[in-house]
Amino acid sequence: MSLPSRLIVECPLCHASYQQEAVRALGETTAGKLFHCSCGTCGRSMMALMRENTGYVSTIGLVTDQTVNDAIRLADRTPISADECIGAHVLLEGESQDFLELLQK
Ligand SMILES: [Zn+2]
């Protein structure tokens, strides 16, 4: 790997340098290497996807409220499908009264 991306060296939100233990490599997929970064200064977190193409590195960052433990726990889960989203919407629409009553218990 060539020079590390700025996104996993410094918090893009407050520009503090990350502590070494604040950046965790979560694994590698065909899309690139995935990192979770927690900023000890501002307390915010980011997921970073790093790709390397013939000598240059590009990184995409996404601000998240996901902790590093959740990121590790959820890494192998299959994505939520469109059908599951529609199913949840239909269920909530049809039974929102029951759902709210359950939440209040
Ligand atoms: Zn920060």
Image: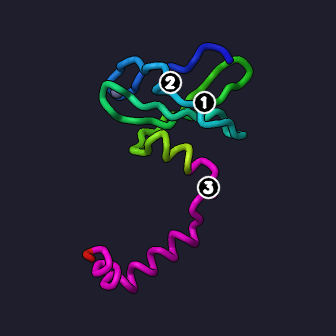
Residue 61, given in percent of the width and then of the height, sits at 49, 34
Question: Is disc 3 in contact with disc 2, using a CB cutoff of under 8 Å?
Answer: no
Per the picture, the main secondary structure of the magenta-coloured stretch is helix
Could you classify mark 2 by the number of other residues whose Cα lies within 10 Å: few (under 14), some (14-19), or many (20 or more)?
A: many
Which residue appears at 59% of the width and 65% of the height?
81
Q: How many angstroms separate mark 1 from mark 3 (CA)?
A: 20 Å
Q: Amino acid at mark 3?
A: Arg
Residue 87, given in percent of the width and then of the height, sits at 51, 76
Quadrant of the displayed image that contains ligand 1? top left
Q: Earlier in the sequence, mark 1 or mark 3?
A: 1
Residue 60, given in percent of the width and then of the height, sits at 53, 33
The residue beneath circle 2 is 8
Q: Relative to 28, is 4 on the left or the right?
A: left
Q: Secondary structure at mark 1?
A: strand
Q: How many angstroms separate mark 1 from mark 2 (CA)?
A: 9 Å
The quadrant of the image that shows the N terminus is: top right
Q: Is residue 56 above or below residue 67?
A: above
Q: Secondary structure at mark 2?
A: helix
Which residue appears at 71% of the width and 25% of the height?
53
The residue beneath circle 1 is 50
Could you classify mark 1 by the number of other residues whose Cα lies within 10 Å: few (under 14), some (14-19), or many (20 or more)?
A: many
Q: Amino acid at mark 2?
A: Ile
Could you classify mark 3 by the number of other residues whose Cα lies within 10 Å: few (under 14), some (14-19), or many (20 or more)?
A: few
